[in-house]
Amino acid sequence: GKIIKDNVISPDALQIRVFEQLFKNGNWLDNNNNSSNLAIDIEDKILRKARELYISAEGDCVARFMKARGYNVLHPMGWDAFGLPAENAAINDGSHPKEWTYANIATMREQLKSIGFSYDWSREITSCDPDYYKHEQKFFLELYERGLAYQKESLVNWDPVDKTVLANEQVIDGRGWRSGALIEKRYLKQWFLKITAYAEELLNEIPKLTNWPDSVKTMQEKWIGKSEGVNFNFKIKDHHHNIEVFSTRPETIFGVSFVALAYDHPIINQLVDKNDKILSFIQQCANMHTNATVEKADKEGVFTGLFVIHPFNQDILLPVIISNFVLRDYGTGAIFGCPAHDVRDHELAKNLQLPIKTVIIPANITAESNHSDPLAAAYTGEGIMVNSDFLNGLNILQARQKVIEEFVNLKIGRQATHYRLKDWGISRQRFWGCPIPIIYCSSCGSMPVREADLPILLPENSKFDGQGNPLEMHPSWKYTNCPKCQKDAIRETDTFDTFFESSWYFTRYCDNSAQDMTNKDACDYWLPVDQYIGGVEHAVMHLLYARFFTKVMNEQSYINIREPFTSLLTQGMVLHATYKDSDNNWVYPFEVEKRADKWFHIVTGKEVFQGRIEKMSKSKKNVVDLETILTQNSADATRLFVLSDTPPEKEFEWSSAGLDGCLRFISRLANMAETIINKDFLAISPLKHSNIEKLTHHTIKYVTKEIEEFKLNKAIARLRELFNALAEELLKETNIKENFSILIRLLNPFIPHITEEIWQKLGNAERLYQIAWPSFDEALLAEEFYVMAIQINGKLRATYQFNNSNNEEEIKNIILQQESVAKYLTGKKPKKIIIVPKKIVNIVI
Ligand code: ANZ
Ligand code: ZN
């Protein structure tokens, strides 16, 4: 059913909107990554589903809770349905990616319903639906018009197996994140979005994201990587060219011993006479794939034959080196090296036997005496300039300012800020994505598709044989006419990176049938998203792209906000125990059974050994089959299990024992309901101001607080305590019907099915999910429980929970009866008992 509901309790309630990120990135779809044979990778699918279930259960619990508290809740669901998996499936079985995708959506939708997630299905969106992606095409053309979408020739990571271009972040240790294939570098004309134009705002707004985890904020800051320094030129000897370098430490200029270039710096092709040594070094650099591998590699270089002239001393000539640690796409792609004060420069200078000249010495003697030999290591600390001409005697900050002034005076340099953040390459050479609405005309160049001709739809009939991009190969799709001169022209056959779809979907949930990209009024009402839940792996790309889109969509008048997500909850990984047989092969959890403390393979009967509890991964086979779990267990038990184990942001261990425990709890709850329903409590007077009554109200108060704070596991633990207390009272024939009712209401967001059923059996006409959250009586809580530490001769031996009504005598009696205390007394009377009220009991023996 729908979860959008107008405020039912407190008319002044704020709106809360719970959004989930289940949508993200093909999650539920088979993210089959085993592209070497393009088979659908079942293990990975299971793995992701377990993860998504985990994410969704939390969102659902909080959505139900907030709704019961009278908030207006938007709890939507959608499908991030473009991407490689569907295309790979098509290659595999000849179906169209569309059929495969919609069939999967249908299955998954039923599964989600069967787990009882309270999504508002009327807001469902599907990113591969033309009704969704057509808005992206129009939006893209608006960006194109503003120069925020542009094309450039760029070196890309080419995945030879998936035949697609990968973002740097998608290359892990030189291999494709999906295919695992070794990545090649290639030049291709690509479409980019100018996210760098927003770098400053994206960075400056981070501190305002107060309800975001610090770890995510730090990652975004590092990703944007703002760096302030100076760009200045070195004159090349005997040529009319300069080499421009970027430096954050220009004060070290008198310690310079070389200038280094990235292997693909344009000067190399222009001026360098490439001998075999240079050629093979360039090739070696080109084979290094990611920044991560560059960082790890030994710092090496080759001399180009060129020299540059020192900016402040014409007599000093510096060799120009091609080096493997200089990146083309950062700063200017060239640096000056000061080996005495930079670790990488130091390593290179040692390798190439270049001079190492100290220009900074630590300011005080103690530090100086600690300062080791400059030939042994670079000194990167603060200090006073030496051997530095007009900078001598200044500290490094003064020297930096002075040298920059001097560059400006000489008109060879200027202050410069660089960012690590790159423009976002959005071109993918794939079929199953949103077509980029551009037409190439041999006379007019790149032409935007006319608005009247939008949307550009994907063809219904295409061949999927794994070779190249099916859009490119299609016999007719790409042939069209130029929108300007009408001559024959060719469509862009690249499609958008699927992060394009996930960068704005939250705006579409506000009104999924809006004529335009968004319904602005609906967005005004719902946005920004109050609570966003997602995996921590989205800390940079997805969350940064979504922030960027929000800003551009704001400028294009689609929304009035500039930041999309108020609170962010990132979830930990799902863990599971690993198993190995005696031959050291990994074994699936479902293949093992426990007999008398040992594990055995269910087929071979051989002993297996439990290994470490690790992040679920297909290579270690420590994954669970969610479908089996759902068929063998109730949806409620599964929900309770995933919610009760750990706080959401921590790692979560999947274990069958944990699941069994939840199943037992649910059946005990059902039994208690039966007992209560069949019992005639009428003769016994109802409980008032009893301990159980207080505990009930105490539980309402703290469970409410804990759900608000996403401490769902704590809330469950508390509810179990109340349940246990009720079970004891029931044995004493106490009338706990009211208390039990409250327990059921509090449990509803966690286990909606069984609680709803019990609720009805208890004789209630209204549906439980429609009634308000229980409130508690403050007056009752005035007499709260408190815990005291019990020390024996100053050592902490136990803790015990007391009640405000307990007097000193009672406290003493209770304590002395405790097993954990009695064992130290060995029958003797303590010398002294000192009570610090509500804090400590000290027993002296
Ligand atoms: C001279 C120098 C002397 C430097 C010194 C450092 C220490 P961040 O803070 O990361 O921006 N650099 C500049 N462009 C580079 C590139 N494309 N590839 C590799 N390294 C590059 O670092 C800026 C510093 O990194 C710059 O300051 C430059 O080296 C180097 F004692 O200039 B420095
Ligand atoms: Zn034309």
Image: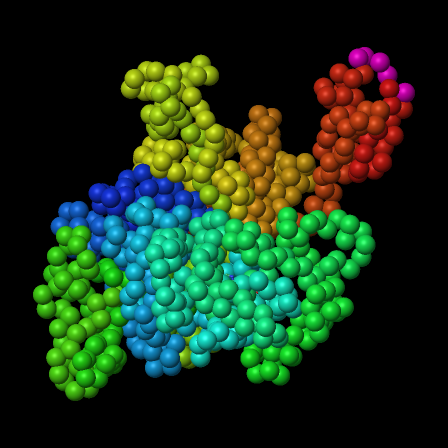
**Residue 650: x %, y % from top left:** 53, 43
361 above or below 676?
Answer: below
User: In the drawing, does residue 328 fall left or right of residue 218?
Assistant: left
Residue 688 shows in the view: no
Main secondary-structure element of the magenta-colored stretch: loop
The image quadrant where one finds the C terminus is top right
Residue at position x 44%, y 34% in the image: 576
77 above or below 571?
Answer: below
**Residue 369: x %, y % from top left:** 78, 50
Q: Residue furthest right?
A: 831
**Residue 411: x %, y % from top left:** 57, 83
The image quadrant where one finds the N terminus is bottom left
User: In the drawing, does residue 687 fall left or right of residue 640?
Assistant: right
Residue at position x 45%, y 26% in the image: 611
Query: Which span is picked out in magenta?
Result: 826-831
Residue at position x 65%, y 74% in the image: 403
- In front here: 705 or 56? 56
User: In the drawing, does residue 109 fall left or right of residue 201?
Assistant: left
Tell whether position 627 is magenta: no
Q: Quadrant of residue 14?
A: bottom right
Q: Quadrant of residue 349?
A: bottom right
- In front here: 98 or 797? 98
Residue 50 shows in the view: yes
Residue at position x 36%, y 77% in the image: 143
